[in-house]
C-alpha cells in the first residue's frame, strides 16, 4: 500500500495564503485528525470537491484557521485520496502543519512525487507529466500556452496516432507472416505499407524540426546585440527592455561585460545580450569583455549586427561581420534620427535589413517584425511541439527506425524482417509517453520537479 505523503504546494515565503497537500490512502483521515470544522461535520463524511472551514490544531493548540478541500479517488490530481489544507501564508505555520501531518502518519513527499503518482495511476502520461514542470517554469505567455497544450495531451495525441498506425501495420505484418495461406489473412502490399510508413515518418520529422522552436519557447530566445563601440547597442537594449539596463555614454568601451535584459515578443521571452563593442584594444579588462561578446555571438539564437548610419562603415566592422554572417542575424542600421553619412546606408559588405533609431524608438516595430520572421515565431501558435531533449531523442530514434524500414522495403527485404524494424520504431514512442520506460528515466524526469508538485 502506498504511504500518505505531505508537502507544501506553495512557495516558502510570506503570502496571503499557503496550501499543504496530502495524498494517499489516509490523506483525509490525517487531515481530519488535525482539523476542527466549525460545522462539527467530520472531514471523512464530506464528498469529493467539498470544503470545510475551521481550525488547524495539534495537542489542543490552535495553529491557524483555514479551509480543507476534500478530493476523493479517482477524481483527484494523483488519482488517490487527497486533502488540500489552505492556511495563512506564513512559512512557520506551513512548517507546523506539515509536522502535524507527519506526526499523524504521513511522510514528507519527494520531489515531483505527487505528479509521479498521477502518472503511475494513469491520470496522465509521461509527456503530460513533463509538461506540468514546463508550465511552472515557462517564461512568457507563448511558452505557458505551449506547455499547457502538452499538459492537455496535444503532443500525446499526435504521438499516439502515429504509434497506433504503426502498431496496426505491425499487427497486419505479423498476421500475414504467421498465416500466409489463410483466406482472411490481410492483403499486405509493399506499396501500401511504404505509403503508411512514409506518412508516419513525415509526422515525426516535422516534430523534430519543431524542437528548436519548442526550446526557444520554453527557455526564451537569446538575442545578442553586436557591433563596434558607440553604435548604440546599449541604447537599443534599453529601448527594447523598456528600462535602463545598460549605461549609455559617448565614450567608446563603456560596456565592459555582457549586460542582459529581457523583453517579450509575441508572448515569447527574449533575452537580450548587450555586448561590449568589438575592436582591437590594449585595455586588458576591455579585452575580456570583447572575448565574452564574441562568445555571445557564437551561442545566441540571433545576432542583431548594429551599424551607425551617421558615419561610414569601418574595416573593423567588415571583419566583425565575417564572424556574424554565418549565424542567424539581422543587419540593423541605427541612428536614423541623425544626418546620414555618405555611403553609410549601404555598407559594401552587408545588406541592411532594417533602419531604426534606438534613441527615439523609430523603426523598433519594424525590427520586431524582422525578428519574428527570422526566428519563425509564427510557429508559436502551433503548440504541438517537443520541448525536452528526452522527447526529441525518442522521436528522432523512431524516425530513424522508420527510415530504415522504408529503405528495407525498397531494397526488397522480406516483410517479416521489415516487421522487426517496425517494432524498433514503435518502442521509442512507447518510451516517450511512458508506456515502456525505465526507472532511471522516471527518476531523471521527476528530479526536476519541486517537492509539492
Image (cartoon, rainbow, N blue to C red):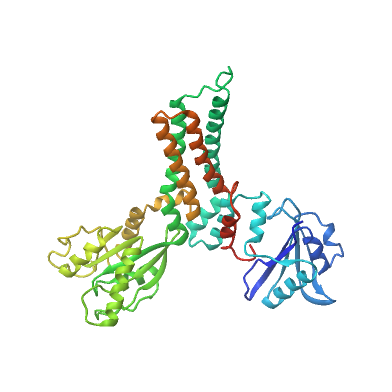
- Does the rendering let one see residue 275? no
Horizontal and vertical percent position of residue 207:
45, 46
Residue 142 image offset from top left, x and y in percent: 48, 56
Image quarter where the N terminus lies is bottom right
Q: Quadrant of residue 205?
A: top left
Left or right side of 153 for 47 = right
In this picture, residue 293 sits left or right of residue 77: left
Q: In which quarter of the image is the C terminus?
A: bottom right
At x 52%, y 57%, the residue is: 144
Along the viewing direction, whichever of 110 and 222 lies nearer the viewer: 110
The quarter of the displayed image where residue 443 is located: bottom right
Q: Nearer the viewer, residue 119 or 167?
A: 167
Asked whether 206 or 443 is in front, the reply is 443
Picture mark count: 0
Q: Residue 105: where, in percent of width, then height?
A: 79, 67
Query: Up-down: is 242 above or below 347?
Result: below
Could you say which quadrant of the image residue 243 lies in? bottom left
Depth check, front residue: 367 or 200? 200
With respect to residue 416, does 261 lie above or below? below
Q: Tell me if I can see residue 287 in this picture.
A: yes
The residue lying furthest to the top in this view is 183
Return the x and y of residue 98 as percentages of the image width and height. 73, 71
**Residue ID at (33%, 68%):** 296
Left or right: where does residue 226 sit relative to residue 217?
left
Amino acid at each position: 500500500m502506498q504511504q500518505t505523503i505531505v508537502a507544501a504546494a506553495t512557495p516558502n515565503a510570506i503570502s496571503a495564503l499557503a496550501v499543504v497537500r496530502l495524498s494517499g490512502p489516509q490523506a483525509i483521515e490525517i487531515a481530519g485528525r488535525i482539523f476542527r470544522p466549525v460545522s462539527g461535520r467530520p472531514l471523512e463524511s464530506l464528498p469529493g470537491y467539498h470544503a470545510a472551514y475551521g481550525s488547524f490544531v495539534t495537542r489542543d493548540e490552535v495553529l491557524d484557521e483555514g479551509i480543507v478541500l476534500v478530493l476523493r479517488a479517482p477524481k483527484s490530481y494523483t488519482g488517490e485520496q487527497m486533502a488540500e489544507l489552505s492556511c495563512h501564508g506564513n512559512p512557520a505555520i506551513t512548517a507546523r502543519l506539515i509536522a502535524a501531518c507527519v506526526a499523524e502518519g504521513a511522510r514528507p513527499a519527494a520531489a515531483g512525487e505527487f505528479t509521479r503518482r498521477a502518472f503511475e495511476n494513469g491520470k496522465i502520461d509521461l509527456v503530460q507529466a513533463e509538461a506540468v514542470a514546463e508550465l511552472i517554469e515557462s517564461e512568457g505567455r507563448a511558452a505557458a500556452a505551449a506547455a499547457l497544450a502538452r499538459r492537455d495531451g496535444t503532443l500525446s495525441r499526435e504521438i499516439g496516432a502515429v504509434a497506433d498506425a504503426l502498431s496496426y501495420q505491425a499487427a497486419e505484418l505479423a498476421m500475414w507472416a504467421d498465416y500466409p495461406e489463410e483466406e482472411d489473412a490481410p492483403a499486405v502490399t509493399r506499396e501500401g505499407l511504404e505509403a503508411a510508413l512514409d506518412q508516419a515518418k513525415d509526422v515525426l520529422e516535422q516534430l523534430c524540426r519543431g524542437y528548436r522552436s519548442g526550446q526557444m519557447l520554453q527557455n526564451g530566445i537569446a538575442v545578442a546585440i553586436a557591433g563596434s563601440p558607440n553604435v548604440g547597442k546599449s541604447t537599443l537594449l534599453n529601448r527594447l527592455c523598456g528600462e535602463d539596463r545598460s549605461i549609455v555614454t559617448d565614450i567608446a568601451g563603456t560596456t565592459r561585460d555582457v549586460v542582459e535584459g529581457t523583453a517579450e515578443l509575441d508572448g515569447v521571452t527574449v533575452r537580450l545580450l548587450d555586448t561590449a563593442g568589438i575592436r582591437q584594444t590594449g585595455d586588458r579588462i576591455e579585452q575580456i569583455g570583447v572575448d565574452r561578446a564574441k562568445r555571445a555571438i557564437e551561442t545566441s539564437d540571433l545576432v542583431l549586427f548594429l551599424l551607425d548610419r551617421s558615419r561610414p562603415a569601418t574595416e573593423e566592422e567588415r571583419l566583425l561581420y565575417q564572424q556574424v554572417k554565418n549565424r542567424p542575424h539581422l543587419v540593423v542600421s541605427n541612428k536614423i534620427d541623425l544626418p546620414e553619412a555618405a555611403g553609410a546606408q549601404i555598407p559594401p559588405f552587408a545588406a541592411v535589413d532594417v533602419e531604426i533609431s534606438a534613441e527615439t524608438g523609430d523603426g523598433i516595430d519594424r525590427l520586431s517584425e524582422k525578428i519574428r520572421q527570422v526566428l519563425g515565431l509564427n510557429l508559436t501558435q502551433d503548440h504541438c511541439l517537443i520541448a525536452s531533449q528526452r522527447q526529441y531523442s525518442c522521436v528522432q530514434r523512431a524516425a530513424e527506425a522508420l527510415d530504415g524500414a522504408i529503405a528495407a522495403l525498397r531494397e526488397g527485404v522480406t516483410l517479416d524482417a521489415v516487421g522487426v524494424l517496425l517494432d524498433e520504431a514503435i518502442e521509442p514512442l512507447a518510451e516517450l509517453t511512458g508506456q515502456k520506460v525505465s526507472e532511471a528515466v522516471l527518476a531523471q524526469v521527476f528530479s526536476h520537479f519541486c517537492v509539492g508538485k
